[in-house]
Amino acid sequence: MKLLVSACLLGVPCRYDGASKSCPEMEALLKQHTCIPVCPEQLGGLSTPRLPAERRGEGVFTREGGDVTAQFRRGAEVTLELARKYGCEAAVLKERSPSCGRGIIHDGTFFSGLTAGDGVTAELLEANGIPVYGESRVGELLSHVK
């Protein structure tokens, strides 16, 4: 199976803080499937490192109040284009991210609060029939798809 995977989960230092979030479960995923690494925030034109951002309603804003919604939307669109180009059947994305989070994301207050919702990219992928799994659900994905 071909999967989109958040590049930070594969050890690429592309998060807002310039770090990665390597996930041990990714090793099994890499052995069994073709993984296409993506960082929607970089694909949307944002640098690394960059100011922390959180989603509020339909918009995405930095802690300092800057509106980065356009960059997040552009990154989501490019990610969807890549998913289509490479025939990706699902995505494994970074949980709680304003781009990649699925089901629960940071609440937009920058105080570590969480709320129900999806990141911009996760929302677009799901709307286009590409299932999105967070890194904590990799085992579930592996057990359902061989």
Image (tube, rainbow, N blue to C red):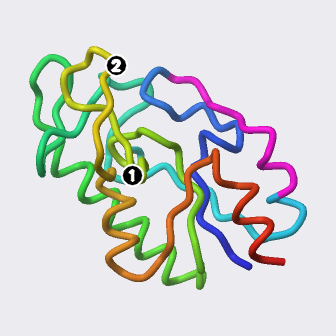
Which residue is painted at 80% across and 70% down in the image?
33
Q: Which three-letter amino acid code belongs to the residue tagged 1? A: Gly
Q: Residue 25, how many percent across, how many down?
A: 79, 46
- Quarter residue 79 falls in: bottom left
Q: In the rendered image of this protein, does residue 62 appear above or below residue 60?
A: above
Q: Residue 50, how many percent across, how many down?
A: 35, 25
Q: Residue 11, how many percent across, how many down?
A: 70, 36
Which residue is painted at 53% across and 35% down in the image?
14
Q: In the rendered image of this protein, does residue 121 appear above or below residue 17?
A: below
Q: Quadrant of the C terminus?
A: bottom right
The alpha-carbon separation of the residues under discs 1 and 2 comes to 16 Å
Q: Which residue is mark 2?
A: 112
Count of residue discs: 2
In-front residue for pair 144/95: 144
Q: Dot 1: what SS? A: loop
- Quarter residue 104 falls in: top left
Q: In the rendered image of this protein, does residue 67 appear above or below residue 17?
A: below
In-front residue for pair 59/116: 116
Please give the range of residues in magenta. 18-28
Q: Which residue is mark 1?
A: 103
Q: Earlier in the sequence, mark 1 or mark 2?
A: 1
Please rate how many residues cluster around mark 2, counting C-alpha atoms within 10 Å: few if below 14, some from 14 to 19, many from 20.
few
Q: Residue 8, how many percent across, how many down?
A: 60, 39
Which residue is painted at 49% across and 31% down in the image?
15
Q: Which three-letter amino acid code belongs to the residue tagged 2? A: Ser
Which residue is painted at 29% across and 55% down in the image?
120
Dominant secondary-structure state across the stretch colored magenta:
loop
Please rate how many residues cluster around mark 1, counting C-alpha atoms within 10 Å: few if below 14, some from 14 to 19, many from 20.
some
Q: Dot 2: what SS? A: loop
Tell whether position 121 is magenta. Answer: no
